[in-house]
Structure formats: C-alpha cells, structure tokens
Amino acid sequence: MSAQMQTGSGINFDAWDMQEFDWTGKSFYFIPIINLFYRPIGLGSKLELLNREVRQGGYKIASNMILIQYCPFKGRAMIEVEKQDKYDAQVLTLETNATVDTMVFRGTYSQWGKGIKRLTERVAAKRGLAPRELYYMYVVGWEPGAYRTILFALT
C-alpha cells in the first residue's frame, strides 16, 4: 500500500474510493477459506495461518493489506508479496490485464450486498463485463458506527 493510501491515523479512504488500479504482475500469497453464504468461517485462525505461512516461506510482504474473497462457499484470503522466481501453488500472480476497481462502503457486514451490487454495476457499465472476482478489506473504525470496507472488483 503506498504512502498516499495511508494517513497518520490509518487508511486514506479517499485514495481508495471509486478508483481504478492496474494490478498486472502483482503476486499474492493465498490460503483457501470456507465461506458460508459469503461469511468466512474461522477467519481469525486462517489469517494467523496466512501470516505464518508467508513468514515460513520466506516471502517479503509488499503490502499489509489482506484481501478476503467475497463468494458464497470456497474462497481465499490473500496478501500481496514480492514476486519470486520459484514456483509455489499458493501464489497467485496476475499476469494478464488485471484491473481492479475499488469502492469504500460505509456500513455493516449485513449491508455489504448493496455495495457489492453498486460496484458490480459500475464495473459492468464501464467495461461491458462483470468482475471475475470480488474481494474486500474490512476496516474497523474507532468511532461507533464507523464501519468501512474497501471493496475490490477484479476484471
């Protein structure tokens, strides 16, 4: 995550809201997760496992942003790592035109469907096709009711 996307108090949400990024060539170390109707099961232990495997594998983390795949059943949790020459089945490298559209959604988890729908419609109108995959990064705010989630649509 670049310095412009962070502020002294955390994440600069303006840098993520309604933006488009070229992620071609980015590499992500991932672990599979189980979702039950879009809700991850045992996410805390999975994130601990992700961090442990990244350290044990000798990967250098390129960004501390952990993305969770938004899908009904089988998904993945992933973190950006620096690309290495060795093959690893747990590393996803976005080789072909990988564009990510983002949106900051303000609301609780139960309201995410609205944000996902808006982002999907925006991407479809802009590119003429639905996103390949959807991810999110959940950010807990310090003020009551300050829930924010950065939604990612990968095309």
Image: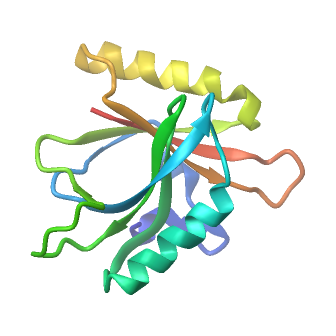
Image quadrant in which the N terminus is located: bottom left
Furthest residue toward right:
144
Q: Nearer the viewer, residue 104 or 70?
A: 70
Q: Position of residue 27 (x, y in %)?
A: 25, 62
Q: Residue at x 16, y 75 (%)?
A: 84
Depicted 36 relative to depicted 77: above or below: above
Relative to 27, is 68 on the left or the right?
right
Residue 8 drawn at (x, y percent): 62, 75
The quarter of the picture where the C terminus appears is top left
Which residue is found at the position 12% from the left and 75% from the top? 86
Q: How many marks?
A: 0
Residue at figure coordinates x 43%, y 76% from the top left: 53
Q: Is residue 27 left or right of residue 138?
A: left
Quarter of the figure with residue 131: top left
Q: Nearer the viewer, residue 89 or 149?
A: 89
Q: Picture coordinates of residue 130 (x, y %)?
A: 32, 19
Residue in the picture at 24% in, 20% down: 127
Which is nearer the eye, 46 or 104?
46
Front residue of 42/62: it is 42
Please tell me in which quadrant of the rendered image residue 60 appears.
bottom left
Residue 137, placed above or below residue 6: above
User: Is residue 32 shown left or right of residue 35?
Assistant: left
Above or below residue 129? Residue 90 is below
110 sits to left or right of 122: right
